[in-house]
Image (tube, coloured by chain):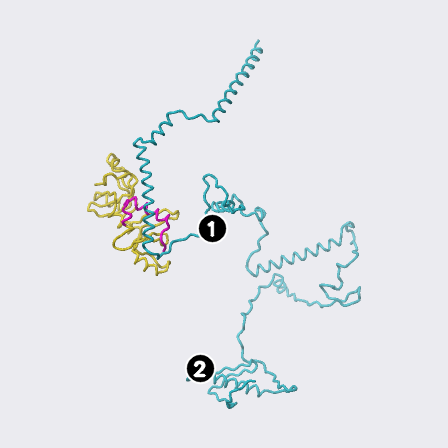
């Protein structure tokens, strides 16, 4: 377990910022307790200072996880978000998309969101920005990248891809062993 | 002078519950009584008693007197001490030994000394100053029907060398057989020795490291070496990675991450501003348009090119003139 280097911090924050914008500072500067990001075996964990100190007592090998796993660094040192980060992305998300009930399942099985499945979308979503996917009952079910902005998607045909799938709640079942 | 504590001498007779094993040959006594009471105090007195017992049995042996000293011949040891080293493993017999066992050939021992006819002396059979040494011959009789121009001294030396070499290979083969490996047949000739891996067979990473090494192989360890355009930085710079301590003060870390965030924000803002200004047809945009519409300044090389082209065209015209004339003549 170690703090992130400046380079790593930049990568993590740019990724987070694509979803929650300036709200990243809300994650760093919290009123309730000191929270920190830690790199443990190339995975980035977000935990309170207190919890981190307790976890630091455990040796590197047996320590599996602590706090919330935000994502991981790939072998080529790119940062990928995990579905576990959804709890922190959803409340601060700048751009959201609501799915129709029948498109929900498609998304939860790891498919992209088509125009036909979109019920609502945040106004002014630019293309290639991070977007959080919610069900009609406002339950966050995953996130992805907007393949088309709000303006473009209005004109697009019903089979056009609107959101490129990145993570969804189904991964808790599908990738149970690797999460 | 040493002043001893005046303690009365203890008795030489010792009584034991269980008879101890005494091996005088090894000067060994094994006490088989059970330990009772205070261990440390008991042990001291026990050690004394046991030593006394051992010496009692030594005194019972047959004694000799040489001047002032009393000597005793120790009997052969009866107690078998464990071996210090493990028993050597049985070596696999050599090929000759196997063959000899099969045929029932037994080793004949040669006499260590032979009688030398020339010097009329007994001399070692082999080695330095050996008897009947054929290398010391000053003349060799040429056998019948043999080439008289051949160097028979040289031949002897060669034959000896061959025998030694043959024996050496046989020895190595036997050794390999014992170690259960196979002998490799010499170094391969397809790759030259000492020049490393063939560059064509190197992996991408090996090439990468070779380039890196070459870059720092200057007198200044690559400090003043200018990099080429688009050249990659060395993979291994020799610097070890360093991380912040895990449990520093939290405020420090918060500060650091907020700074990183601020830097990111600034970066983004710059890009957005630039884009916005271009889109709005600001200064930047106008400049670019001007450049596109106006003719770019003539460069030196361009002037050159034009001159050269002119000359070329003129040359061609001249030459064409000539050929036309020639052609005309031929027609006529």
Q: Quadrant of the N terminus of chain B?
A: bottom right
Q: Residue at horizontal 71%, vertical 68%?
A: B112
Q: Is residue B233 left or right of residue B64?
A: left
Residue beneath disc 1 = B238
Q: Is residue A9 magenta?
A: yes
* Count of numbered marks: 2
Mark found first going from the N terminus, 1 or 2 = 2
Q: Is residue B295 magenta?
A: no
Q: What is the magenta range?
A: A1-26
For chain A, the rendered hue is yellow
Q: Residue at horizontal 79%, vertical 54%?
A: B142
**Figure quadrant of residue B328:** top right
Disc 1 packing (10 Å; few <14; some 14–19; many ≥20): few
Q: Is residue B98 left or right of residue A145?
A: right
Residues behind callouts 1 and 2 on a single chain: yes
Residue lying farthest top?
B332
Chain coloured cyan here: B
Q: Quadrant of the C terminus of chain B?
A: top right
Provide the chain ID for the residue under circle 2.
B
In whole angstroms, how far apart are the C-alphas of marks 1 and 2? 60 Å
Q: What's the mark number on residue B40?
A: 2
Name the spot of residue A67 as percent of width and height, x first. Answer: 30, 55
**Please, is residue A13 above or below residue B291 in the view?**
below
């Amino acid at each position: 377990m170690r703090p992130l280097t400046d380079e790593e911090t930049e990568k993590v924050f740019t990724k987070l910022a694509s979803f929650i914008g300036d709200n990243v500072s809300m994650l760093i500067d919290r009123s309730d307790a000191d929270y920190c990001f830690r790199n443990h075996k190339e995975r980035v964990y977000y935990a309170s200072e207190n919890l981190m100190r307790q976890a630091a007592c455990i040796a590197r090998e047996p320590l599996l996880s602590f706090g919330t796993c935000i994502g991981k660094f790939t072998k080529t040192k790119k940062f990928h978000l995990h579905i576990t980060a959804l709890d922190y992305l959803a409340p601060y998300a700048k751009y959201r998309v609501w799915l129709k009930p029948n498109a929900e399942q498609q998304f939860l099985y790891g498919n992209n969101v088509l125009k036909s499945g979109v019920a609502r979308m945040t106004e002014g979503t630019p293309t290639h920005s991070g977007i959080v996917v919610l069900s009609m009952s406002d339950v966050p079910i995953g996130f992805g990248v907007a393949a088309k902005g709000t303006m473009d998607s209005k004109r697009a045909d019903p089979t056009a891809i609107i959101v490129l799938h990145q993570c969804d709640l189904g991964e808790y079942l599908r990738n149970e062993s690797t999460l | 002078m040493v002043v001893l504590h005046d303690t009365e001498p203890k008795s030489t007779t010792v009584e034991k519950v269980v008879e101890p094993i005494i091996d005088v040959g090894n000067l060994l006594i094994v006490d088989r009584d059970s330990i009772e009471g205070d261990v440390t105090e008991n042990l001291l007195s026990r050690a004394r008693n046991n030593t006394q017992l051992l010496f009692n049995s030594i005194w019972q042996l047959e004694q000799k007197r040489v001047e002032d000293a009393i000597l005793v011949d120790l009997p052969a040891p009866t107690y078998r001490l464990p071996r210090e080293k493990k028993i050597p493993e049985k070596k696999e017999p050599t090929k000759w030994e196997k063959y000899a066992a099969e045929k029932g050939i037994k080793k004949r021992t040669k006499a260590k000394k032979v009688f030398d006819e020339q010097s009329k002396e007994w001399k070692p059979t082999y080695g330095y100053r050996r008897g009947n040494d054929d290398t010391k011959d000053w003349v060799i009789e040429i056998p019948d029907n043999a080439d008289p121009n051949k160097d028979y001294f040289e031949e002897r030396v060669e034959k000896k060398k061959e025998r030694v070499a043959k024996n050496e290979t046989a020895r190595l083969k036997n050794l390999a057989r014992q170690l259960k490996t196979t002998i490799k047949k010499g170094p391969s000739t397809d790759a030259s020795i000492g020049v490393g891996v063939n560059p064509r067979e190197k992996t991408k990473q090996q090439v990468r490291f070779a380039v890196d090494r070459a870059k720092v192989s200057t007198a200044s360890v690559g400090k003043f070496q200018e990099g080429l355009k688009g050249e990659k930085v060395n993979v291994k710079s020799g610097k070890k990675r360093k991380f912040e301590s895990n449990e520093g003060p939290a405020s420090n870390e918060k500060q650091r991450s907020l700074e990183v965030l601020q830097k990111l924000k600034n970066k983004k803002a710059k890009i957005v501003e630039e884009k916005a200004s271009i889109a709005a047809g600001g200064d930047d945009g106008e400049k670019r348009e001007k450049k596109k519409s106006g003719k770019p300044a003539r460069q030196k090389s361009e002037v050159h090119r034009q001159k050269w082209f002119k000359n070329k065209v003129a040359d061609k015209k001249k030459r064409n003139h000539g050929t036309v004339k020639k052609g005309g003549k031929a027609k006529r």
